[in-house]
Amino acid sequence: MIRLFAFFPALTALVLSGSLFGGCIISSDVTDFEIKLPDKSFHFDTAQISPPTVIVMTEACVVSPSDSCAAISEDLFCNSDGDCEVTDPTVLPTIPCSVDSDCSALFGDTFSCNQTDEACQATVEFELSTPVNLADEVPELEDLGNSQFTKVRFSYVRMVVEENTFSIATPEVELYIAPEAVASPWVPASDPRELDSGVFSVGVVDSIAASTSGHTVDVQLDADGDVALSEYCRTPSVTFKFFVYAEMSFRAGDPIPQGALTLVIDAAAIVGLN
């Protein structure tokens, strides 16, 4: 399973009450206008999730009279260095287990024991963020002043799939908005995971097919994102973050994902004035 998380793009012509604003003439009968938010790009590379192909043994393995690595799993063999090596590095080997420590001791903390399969599985998380300062990136908001806003809501949020060489389909994509000081969307050590204070969901994108690029997919918006965006638009000098989060799990016998993914968020908001 993969989940992803991210954010935004520039400004369209605006119209407001009887004066010049940002080079545009403002009409007195217009109270709502659309702004485009700054482009933000996120890059995911599966190179960081490849499990080790060699398990370094504390005691050297032996080939004779029978291969001691193969005795652990038919997906392993004893190499010339005395370590267990994976026979097919493109597939997650089937390593029997009964508890999580059986797997983490061999492969690291990203591995746990799947109790149904009784074999090791990998769970890898991507967590990316980028700062947004609306005063710098959408200066028209600063010019309007804090007191004029009656509402702010997302007009649309879309993901542009700029590059996708992933060998598997991505599961849903999730987007988050958070204060600048937040290091992660989640409460530390929370299980099940819960959002940290001040972090809001923007929305979710459905699965992106493997090796498909150059298209745009819509984000199914969450009302909580509008609440957070409203506050940041009213105080555009306050920097905040957009987070992209991805969780990928694969089980024994699954192909190990290959490739990279670059997403650019294209978003706009409707701003209402007094």
Image (tube, rainbow, N blue to C red):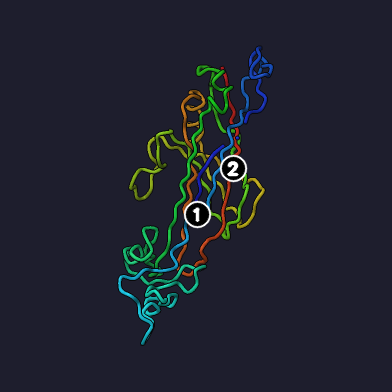
Q: Which residue is mark 1?
A: 2
Q: Do callouts 2 and 1 mark residues in contact (Cβ within 8 Å)?
A: no
Residue 77 location in percent, x, y? Answer: 42, 77
When asked about the image quadrant of residue 116, the answer is: bottom left
| SS category of the residue bearing label 1 | loop
- Please name the residue shown 62% across and 20% down the image: 31
Labels in figure, total? 2
| Tag shown at residue 228 | none
Which residue sits furthest bottom? 65
| Residue 104 percent location from the top left of the image | 35, 62
Query: Which residue, given by chain and number where applicable, does mark 2 sit on?
Result: 264
- Indicate the amino acid at tag 1: Ile
Write the residue at 40% across / 71% down.
95
Query: Which image quarter holds the C terminus?
Result: top right
Q: Looking at the image, which residue is at 56% across and 38% down?
A: 40
Mark 1, Cα crowd under 10 Å, few <14 / some 14-19 / many 20+, is many
**Where's residue 208, x and y in %?**
59, 53
The three-letter code of the residue at mark 2 reads Val
